[in-house]
Image: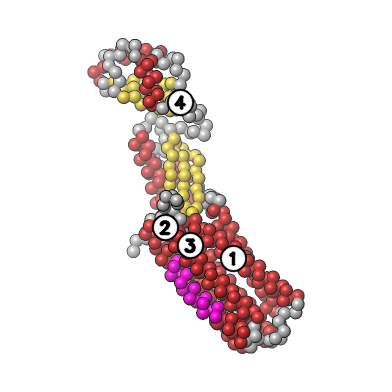
Amino acid sequence: MQTPQIGSQEHRDQRRQASAKVALVGALTNVVLCVAKIAAGILGHSQALIVDGIHSLSDLLTDILVLVASHHASHGPDENHPYGHGRFETAATLALGAFLVLIAGGIMWDSAERLMHGGAAQAPESIALYAALFSILANEALYWYTILVARNIKSELLRANAWHHRTDAISSIVVLAGVGGAMLGVLWLDLVAALIVGFMVAKIGWDLGWGAMRELVDESLEEEKVGQIRNLIADIPGVSSLHMLRTRRQGHEAMVDVHVQVTPWISVSEGHMISIAVEEQIKANIEEVSDVTVHIDPEDDETAPTCSNLPLREDVLKILHGAWRDLNCPAWEEHILLHYLGGKIDLEVFFPLHCYGDATAAGQLHEEMSQALKDHPEFGKLRLYFG
């Protein structure tokens, strides 16, 4: 089956359905884990297992977050969100990363306090050991299920949620070690392990949150991909050079803005075709790029004199007709092309073929028309064509 194009509504719907299915499976599993671990913790006299059950309750909340965020992110562009809703997914990833850091901080703080005050006084029973083992297996299964879907649809939000499931499995390993150690009389063993795992969870949360934050502030794509985009554009026939290449991410998609320099005397339609070729070439070779904006430049507008103060066509024609009205032209022009280059307006004037007498007459007409514009420094080169 053909993969939908990134950025298409079909692709967004596919991602929404996959994300919703993962979130639903995760939510149902976490409901079972939450109830089972808290009940086993109470019956088995394990404070660590009760805390781990509360951790599973937090997972349920993040599954709901994934469900809501993926629903919003699947919507295409609208009047209020012309670039789509991909940033909903990014914002949710940031929130999830922050949540992981907070959860890890809570685990570390609680473990440190229990360690300083001697830990739990009562050894747990075997039911707590079995509940912790069940939690490890269930969360590890959830991790692999979620991470495979995340890789398939390229969702950082699902990837973040998958790592949340992995941290749950690790925290349950800590509980398993703690319960086992406590049953053997080593009551402080799970607390030291919890501090180490808490740091690992905090690191994962920080990496996820920092990546989402960089996306929200429009950080560029990786240097390697920017270089690849640059090479793709430079290889397109008709492109003289490029500058002001800007890239950014929005959820699983990427966007490119670029100024492309072309030969200044080509037609508008040819310049438009070159811009289409640039867009198609980038999208065909960089999978995550869904939007390309190409600005066609007749010269390097970063170094060339500005044309911003020059008059537009309506005013230019008034000036020309006024300057040339007393000339003895064989016939009036058919049309005039304006080229805004180097801070001036170059002119191409087209006459019918029957107006051409000989080279001497054409040269004299060119001289007269040029002299008539000597008091107008905004004009540059003048070319006459007959045909």
Q: Which residue is labeled 4 in the image? A: 310
Instruction: Say what amino acid the circle numbered 1 marks.
Output: Phe
In the rendered view, tell whether residue 156 sits above or below residue 348. below
Q: Which residue is labeled 3 in the image? A: 69
Decide: few, some or many residues near mark 3? Use Cα within 10 Å; few <14, some 14-19, many ≥20: many
In the rendered view, tell whether residue 326 sits above or below residue 46. above
Q: Can residue 104 be seen in this view?
A: yes
**Does label 1 or label 3 sit earlier along the sequence?**
3
| Residue 176, image quadrant | bottom right
Instruction: Tell me the distance, in whole angstroms, between the alpha carbons under discs 2 and 4.
Output: 43 Å
Instruction: Tell me the distance, in whole angstroms, between the alpha carbons under discs 1 and 3.
Output: 15 Å
Q: Is residue 386 visible?
A: no
User: Residue 145 or 74: which is nearer the viewer?
Assistant: 74
In the rendered view, tell whether residue 161 sits above or below residue 269. below
Are circles 1 and 3 on residues that touch, CB within 8 Å? Answer: no
Q: Which residue is labeled 2 in the image? A: 75
Q: Which residue is labeled 1 in the image? A: 99
Which type of secondary structure does the marked residue at label 2 adopt?
Answer: loop
Instruction: Tell me the distance, in whole angstroms, between the alpha carbons under discs 3 and 2.
Output: 11 Å
Marks 3, 4: nearer the viewer: 3
